[in-house]
Each structure stands twice: as structure tokens, then as C-alpha cells.
Image (cartoon, helix red, strand yellow):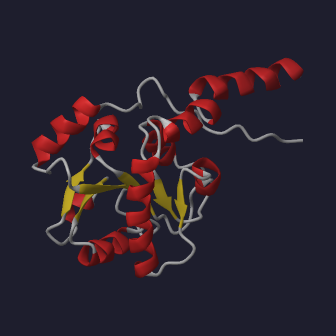
Amino acid sequence: NSIVIPNGIDTNHFKPNLFIKKKMRNKLGISPNKIVALYAARLDPMKGHDQIIKLANKCRDITFIMLGTGTEKLNVPNNIIKLGVINDMNSMYNMADILLHFSKYGEGFPNVIGEAMACDLPVLANNTGDSKSIIADKGYIIQNEELLEIENNIYELVKMKKSFNKNHIRNRIVSKFSVSRMVNSYLKVYNEK
């Protein structure tokens, strides 16, 4: 017998904050109206950094932010800001308009997706690990690796976010993937033994 208990996201820490958004964009020299796509992943063959670089070359009107160990060493177009390791992910999520997640393999439960969604950020990801079950209808799962489709999905996601009520995306994480929900799931298992 087995049961799957998803990771819990700290929704008290990861939450929307407009003040942080303005502050971080000002700090990085990004205008308030600019579309910002966040990509948080260490430099590793299993991660899709090459895809982000190709996208940035096509989508010159979008600012891409790359975070993670080794990203500061990448050769990228001028609409990518590479920041390397960042400890304050809450600020990064709040500064962005969307999160991109393109791991090629080896994913389980990508915390970065849950954390971003807790900050009310829509996600565009490929179908690895639990990405699809976390995102549900609060973002997009890409069906193939064609750049044109991914580019169209990015712009659709930005439009989608504007049409959502405040905390529409966040509410999925609070109700399905919060730390308290995870703890209660463990307690239920222990109490049944």
C-alpha cells in the first residue's frame, strides 16, 4: 500500500506583494509595463536553458530573468538578465509576470512552480514530473518544443493573468499544496496506523 503526499508550499512566505514588485523592477532597471518571464534552474543538461535563450532571441519585447547556480556564466542576448544564485525567491516571483519551467527529465514535484503560483504567478511548463497536476488550468503545459507554440503560449499566459481575479492562481496552492495541507495529510496517515 502506498499514498502520495505532495510537498507543502509555505503560503505565508510566498504571497503576492506589489511593493516588492515595484522595488525589484526599479532595482534591476525594468519598466513597470515590461513583460518579465522568470526561469529559475541551476545550469544542468536536464534543465532547458537553451530553450530560454532561443525564446529570448525571438521575443525581444520580453525581459527574461535567469536564476540558479551557473546561470551567470551563460552567453545570452541582451534581453536576458542572469542573476546566478538568489536566496530571496519571493522577491523574484513577485517581480515577474510568468514563470517558465522546461526541465527535460528528472523532475518530481517542482517546488518552484508551487512557490511561483503561491505568488499568483501563472506558469508555462513542459509535462515533466508533477508539473501538470500542480498547474491544472492555472497555466499551460506545452504540447511540443516548437518555439512558435511556446512563444504564443507566453503571450496567451500574460493575457490570461490579466483576466484572472486577484489570487486566482494562488488559491489553488493554498487549497491543494499548502504546508498545513501536507501536515494534515501526514497526520491522517499516522492516525490510521
Q: Residue at x 41, y 68 (%)?
A: 48
Residue 193: x %, y % from top left: 89, 22
Along the horizontal axis of the image, is 19 left or right of 118?
A: left
Along the horizontal axis of the image, is 35 left or right of 118?
A: left
Q: Nearer the viewer, residue 17 or 104?
A: 17
Q: Residue at x 9, y 49 (%)?
A: 29
Figure disc tally: 0
Quadrant for the N terminus, please. Answer: top right
Seen as rendered, the residue at the extreme front is: 163
Seen as rendered, the residue at the extreme top is: 191
Along the horizontal axis of the image, is 18 left or right of 75?
A: right
Residue 149: x %, y % from top left: 46, 77
Q: Is residue 109 above or below residue 183?
A: below
Q: Residue at x 64, y 35 (%)?
A: 176
Q: Residue at x 38, y 57 (%)?
A: 158
Q: Nearer the viewer, residue 174 or 181?
A: 174
Along the horizontal axis of the image, is 106 left or right of 121?
A: right
Q: Is residue 182 above or below residue 108?
A: above
Residue 166: x %, y % from top left: 44, 35
Q: Quadrant of residue 51?
A: bottom left
Q: Quadrant of residue 26?
A: top left
Residue 72: x %, y % from top left: 20, 59
Residue 105 seen by the camera: yes
